[in-house]
Image (tube, rainbow, N blue to C red):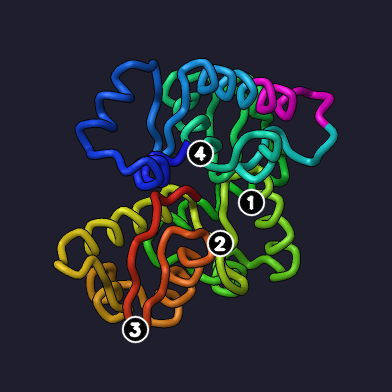
Amino acid sequence: LRMNIFQRVWNLTDRAQASLLAGHETEIFDGLVVSKTQWQATLDQCLETVEAASSPTAQNDRVGLSLHDLGAVAKPLRQPALEALLKTGKIAKRGAVYFIPQAEPALPAELLAIWEQVEPLLDQLQAPSCGDMAKQLNQPLAKLERSLLELAKSGRLVPLGNHRFYLPRRLQEIADVVQAMTEQTAQGTMTVKEFRDRTGIGRNVAIDVLEFFDKKGFTRRQGNERIVVRPFSP
């Protein structure tokens, strides 16, 4: 139930609305009111779906699932349910992939070796391009990019723009900066230049990062400025 719509249709005051809710066991997520019974059923459904996707017999090339794989769960409840399961430790997350903690597979030896080489190189706010890393590691570019895509499937990396990958934790760090910047202005906005000055990220990469945030629904462009729309999740 969208409380703002319900309140408007029935012409409820804030006090009347609060009184109405006080008589029921509910959970509220961004204006969406859900009964505790429905909420528990949603948690159970999400957990069962993650468990199924994390089993050795899961028919996919990765262990776990992404937010968009929860098609049977009401869309507004997917993120809150996953966040609640993460807080209780019932599921874990790497990048955009959710899985049962005991189910995370070890990387193949060759891929693990690549991971141990690229992780330190990518552990910065301005991730180097695949081409730059290939030169540093003396690796054929095509082979390195194939390995990076495999690492992205495991949730260890996030592909961004053309020929660039980011560590999820670094994207989260940048998103936190964006959130703080918009909260510090009366208009709640931020420009590309302000973002570049604050993070030290070069212009081209900064644009790639911000466009990625736009596509994820974290930010929205309004002319030369951007606003934060919803919490960020890699």
- Residue 224 at what x, y percent from top left? 34, 84
Q: Nearer the viewer, residue 189 or 121?
A: 189
Q: Amino acid at mark 4?
A: Gln
State which tag comes first along the sequence, 4 or 3. 4
Q: Are marks 2 and 1 in contact (CB under 8 Å)?
A: yes
Q: Kindly identify which numbered label has been placed on residue 152.
A: 1
Rendered residue at 20%/70% (across/down):
187
**Whole-number angstrom distance, CA of label 1 to CA of label 4:** 20 Å
Q: Number of marks in the image?
A: 4
Label 4 vs label 2, nearer the camera: 4
**Whole-number angstrom distance, CA of label 2 to CA of label 1:** 8 Å
- Residue 8 at what x, y percent from top left? 36, 47
**One can see residue 17 in this view:** yes
Q: Amino acid at mark 2?
A: Phe
Q: Amino acid at mark 1?
A: Ala
Q: Which residue is mark 2?
A: 165
**Whole-number angstrom distance, CA of label 4 to CA of label 3:** 29 Å
Q: Kindly identify which numbered label has been placed on residue 224.
A: 3
